[in-house]
Image (cartoon, rainbow, N blue to C red):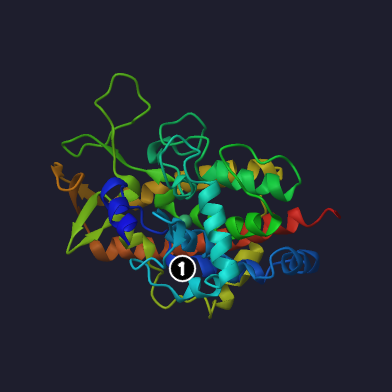
Amino acid sequence: MGWLLVLACLAPLRAAAWGHQGHMLVGAIADQLLTPQARAGLQRDMGLTLAQAAPWADCAKGVGLGTRGFEYAADERWPSPACTRFETAEGVQAMQSYASRNWNTCGQLRDCHKTYHYADVAYQHGRYRMGYVGTNDHDLVHAINAAIAQLQGQPVPPPFSITSRGEALRLLAHFIGDLHQPLHVGALYLDEAGNTVDPDAPGGPEPLETRGGNSLDMGHGDNLHALWDDLPDGLRADAVPASMVQAARALRKSRAAAGRLAQTWASDTVAVSGAAFAGVTVGPSRLDRGRVWPATLAEPADYRARQDALQTRQLTKAGARLAQLVNVLYATPR
Ligand SMILES: [Zn+2]
C-alpha cells in the first residue's frame, strides 16, 4: 500500500463525483430509455448494463504503480461493493491495462486517467470553452469525445488510450454522470483573502483553485465537494423513482452532432454550477496540507433544499443524455 500513501501526499485528492450510487442511478435511468438496438449492442460489446458499468472508471483508480508493476488494490477510501464485479482476474487485468495506458501521457508523472473525470471552468463564465483556465486536452469533455471516437470507429486522439468498444462504453457510462455534477465542471477561483476571482481576466490577482470545492472547509470535517457527493435523501440506484424516468424521457434531446454533445452539456453544467456557490460565505485562507478556505452556508436549510432539487435535475439529465448518446451511437448499422 506504499504507493497509496505517496499518492495521498503528492496528488490533491479529488473525491468521486456522486459516489457509486449516483453513477449507478444515472446508468439505471439510461438503461430504461435505450432502444432495442442499443440494448443489444451494449450486451454484445460490453456484457453489462449501463448501471453496472457506471462505477468502473472510479474502480480503476485503485490501480497504482508498485515495485512489481501496475497493481490493483480496492481503494479503502471508497469501500465499494460496486467494484467487486470487476475484481475477477480478467477484470483486474482490464483495469490495470487501462490505467497503465493512461498513466503518464498527459504531462504528469502518474494518474493521467484521474484527470479525465473533471474540468475546472470558472462558474461565472456560464459556459465551457476550450482555452479557459481549467480546460485542457485531457479534461472531461475531451475524455468523452475520445470514447465517442472509439465507438464511431475513428482514431482516438492522444493522450487517450481507449482500445475497445467495451472500454469506451464503460467510460461513457461514468463520464456522462461526472459531466452533470456541478462541481466537476464549474469551479470557484479565489484569492488568498477568499474573494472570488476570474482566472481568465488579465491583470487580476493570482487565481487560486478550490479543487472542485475540496478546498472549501465547511467545518466538522466536511468540504463543499463532499456535500455534493451524496444523493438527495431517499434516492437509490436500485429503486429509481418512476417520476425521474418519466422526467428523463420527457427531456428535450440535444440537437448537436455526437462529437459536439459533450461541450454543449458541459456548458449547461457550468451555467447551473453558480448555484452551488451561491449562499456560501468564504473567509481568508490558511495553509493546512495545501491551501484551505473556511466556508459557511448562510442559510443551510435553504441551501440543502436548492441542492436536492438541482442534484435531482442533474441526475435526471445525465440519465436522459447518456441514453440519447448511446442510442445515437447504435442508430447507424455497423
Ligand atoms: Zn468520476
How many badges with numbers are in the image? Answer: 1
Q: Which of 247 and 296 is in front in this view?
A: 296
User: What residue do we see at 72% from left, 65% from top?
Assistant: 42
Quick check: 219 left or right of 145?
left
Answer with the quarter of the image where residue 120 lies.
top left
Q: Nearer the viewer, residue 252 or 198?
A: 198
Residue lying farthest to the front in this orientation: 68
Quick check: 74 left or right of 161?
left
Residue 58 visible in rendering: yes
Residue lying farthest to the right in this orientation: 333
Q: Looking at the picture, which amino acid does disc 1 mark?
A: His
Vertical position of residue 239 compared to residue 321: above or below = below
Picture coordinates of residue 64 (x, y %)?
42, 55
Q: Which of 25 and 10 is in front in this view?
A: 10
Element on which disc 1 rests: helix
User: What residue do we see at 41% from left, 48% from top?
Assistant: 273
Residue lying farthest to the top in this orientation: 203
**Does the closest atom of ligand 1 sit within 8 Å of the Cβ of label 1?**
no
Picture coordinates of residue 319 (x, y %)?
59, 63
Q: Which of 39 and 282 is in front in this view?
A: 39
Residue beneath label 1, please?
20
Vertical position of residue 204 compared to residue 93: above or below = above
Vertical position of residue 166 compared to residue 82: above or below = above
Picture coordinates of residue 150 (x, y %)?
70, 47
Quick check: 93 left or right of 67?
right
Q: In which quarter of the image is the N terminus?
A: bottom left
Picture coordinates of residue 146 (x, y %)?
63, 44
Quick check: 236 left or right of 289?
right
Answer with the quarter of the image where residue 261 lies.
top right
Residue 313 visible in rendering: no
User: What residue do we see at 80% from left, 65% from top?
Assistant: 37
Q: How crowded is mark 1: few (under 14 residues within 10 Å), some or many (20 or more)?
A: many
